[in-house]
Image: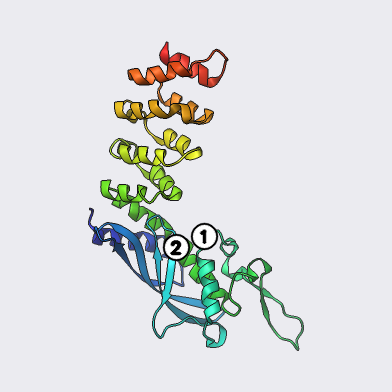
Amino acid sequence: MKNLSYLLFTIIFLWASDTASNEEEPFFEFEIIADEDGLPDAYQAFIKSPVCEKDKCYEIEITMQWDLIGRFQEYDTLTGHGLTKLDHIPFTDEDYLRLERLLKDPHSPIGDYKKEELILDTRKSDIDGFTGATIRAINDIVIGGGVYSCFTLWQLANQKFTDSITKMTIDLFDKKLINKMVNQQDLAVNYFIINNLKPNDFLTYRDEILQMITSNKGYFVKKAIEKMPKEIFRDSITQEYFAKRLNSYNYFTQVAFLKQLNTIRLTSSLKKTLLSQKEERNSLRSNLIKNLIQ
């Protein structure tokens, strides 16, 4: 396992470099939460962040947790530092539940807006003075009187640290961690792995990759095959694996696999499988098979 202290410094440095020009900088301390085997299991951060509304600023103190691919998991407030709305009105239990739903939605429409776009100027007259109204698109998902807090916390949960967290996990990749992640049988985790392995790592993690393919179907299998470098298809175990399963794949997945075999020396069992798939009709799949077994 790689040095976690060094990697923690790396994540803080990477994030700070990306946001150095931001005037409203949060203070944060990251730690890696390990499982009982000492393998990384999640990331946790203590965060102290300013929330500014016009010329007024107040501070939020909170802890947040993410999984290994940067998905927000949960948050917690510190004793004596509960969240508040305008005029320092404390959040209610319902407010906390609404905030949790918001933070767990990485595709929330609140992410489509800049902070200054969240409140509309609803000045009606000199008598009424200035009042503000939350824009309709997010009115039902934020907390009244706590719009800027919601915006700041959603950004922290779903944008500010995500890239650095994923870079951290990629840097931690080794046989044990990849195996742990594959055994989660989480499609998003599987895509994360195949999208972030270096070409020369595919053979190293061959068994784990084939395990992911076995436990999935459809587009993921096609995508995994396309991501795999040609070198892995020279491996006899890889060829034997696909020889037993090729018939179960859809047309497009089979074509993706056959394209990878160009210039590859085939095992006898894979040749036999391809011969059984040979047909007279003219198609891309048929032509690829003919070229491989001629």
Q: Earlier along the polypeptide chain: callout 1 or callout 2?
A: 2
SS for callout 2: strand
Q: Is residue 265 visible?
A: no
> Does the residue at mark 1 contact the one at mark 2 (Cβ under 8 Å)?
yes
Residue 29 percent coordinates (x, y): 33, 70
Q: Residue at x 45, y 78 (%)?
A: 60
**Which circle marks residue 72 in the picture?**
2
Against 40, is 281 above or below? Answer: above
Residue 258, quarter of picture? top left
Q: How far apart are the alpha carbons under marks 1 and 2?
A: 8 Å
Residue 237 percent coordinates (x, y): 30, 29
Q: Is residue 125 visible?
A: yes
Left or right, 147 with respect to 121, comes to: left
Residue 128 percent coordinates (x, y): 74, 87
- Badge 1 crowding class, 10 Å Cα cut-off, few under 14, some 14 to 19, many 20 or more, is some
Mark 2 is on which residue type? Phe
Left or right, 113 with respect to 125, comes to: left
Picture quarter with the C terminus: top left
- Badge 2 crowding class, 10 Å Cα cut-off, few under 14, some 14 to 19, many 20 or more, is many
Residue 289 percent coordinates (x, y): 46, 17
Residue identified by numbered label 1: 106
